[in-house]
Amino acid sequence: MDFLILFLGAMVISAIGFKKFVWFISLGYGFAIAGIGVALLVLFHGSLTPVTVVLSVLLIIYGCRLGGYLLMRERRSASYQNTMKHEIKDGSDMKFVLKVLVWVVCALLYVCEASPVLFRLQNGAGMDGVSVVGAVIMALGIILESASDLTKNSYKKKHPKRFCDVGLFRLVRCPNYLGEVLIWTGVFVSGVIALEGFWQWAAAIGGWICIVYIMFGGARRLELRQNKNYGDDPEYQKYVKTTPILVPFIPLYSVAKYKWLVG
């Protein structure tokens, strides 16, 4: 029942995608996750532990930061809007039934991503070392993602026509996506010893695998766009051949050829 409540809440919030299709996976995503965090605090107010409070609050912080950031970028950045027109369907030629399917699948994914926290609360699991480690990983992911966005925004204001290769972008070419992976890895880790039964494991693992897949797909999409924009730049060629695309210290420098990646 609690899973259903979170699912319905995520559907209500992400329904803004019917106004603008991309909002299903952008604004709807961020604010739905924040809504899930709020719902967890309300639904389980009598059985919260310090770590589940922290995890729920981190979901709210993550969702509000992401949703707010995307909202400001949409309003202020003409280049971003132009990029989205070319990279993501606007839904104008999509049948209503398909839009509803996208809406439902997105809302379900968002709840599955956050489900380890839900199941920890449902199963009455107390505070333990694993949940603390998960919360720390999640917090580090939020910090990394936020710092990456700030770095790139600041750099692009001064160098609008050059690729960003400063700060965290020296570690990996997509540090914001790495932050996203860390966030949801932290959420998953926080619940691993609290999960019970096939369906709880299926929801938790499915949510984590899906978001990691989406992040690699996003990295591929960004790589293709940057290859198009900067491919003739020798500095860019040196950068992409020496800086991993997503995972630090792992010599994976390109995912462009993996057409099965969609993000």
Image (cartoon, rainbow, N blue to C red):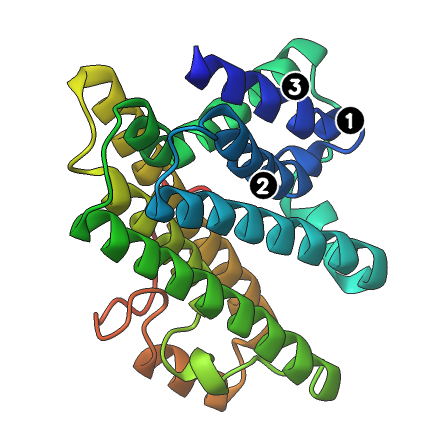
Give the CA separation, mark 1 to mark 2: 28 Å
Mark 3 and mark 1: Cα distance apart in space: 10 Å
Q: Nearer the viewer, mark 3 or mark 1?
A: 3
- Residue 177, placed above or below residue 112: below
* Residue shown at 41% from the left, 61% from the top: 139
Which numbered dot is residue 228?
Answer: none
Question: According to the image, label 2 marks what residue?
Answer: 34
Question: What residue sits right under mark 1 in the picture?
Answer: 92
Give the residue number, with chain letter if any, for mark 3.
99
Confirm whether residue 59 shows in the render: yes
User: Hey, which quadrant is residue 126 in on the image?
Assistant: top left
Q: Residues within 10 Å of mark 3 (few under 14, many from 20)?
A: some
> What residue lies at 50% left-to-right and 54% top-to-bottom?
221
Check the image and report above or below for 94 versus 222.
above
Q: Tag 1: Cα neighbours inside 10 Å, few (<14), some, or many (≥20)?
A: few
Mark 3 to mark 2 CA distance (whole Å): 23 Å
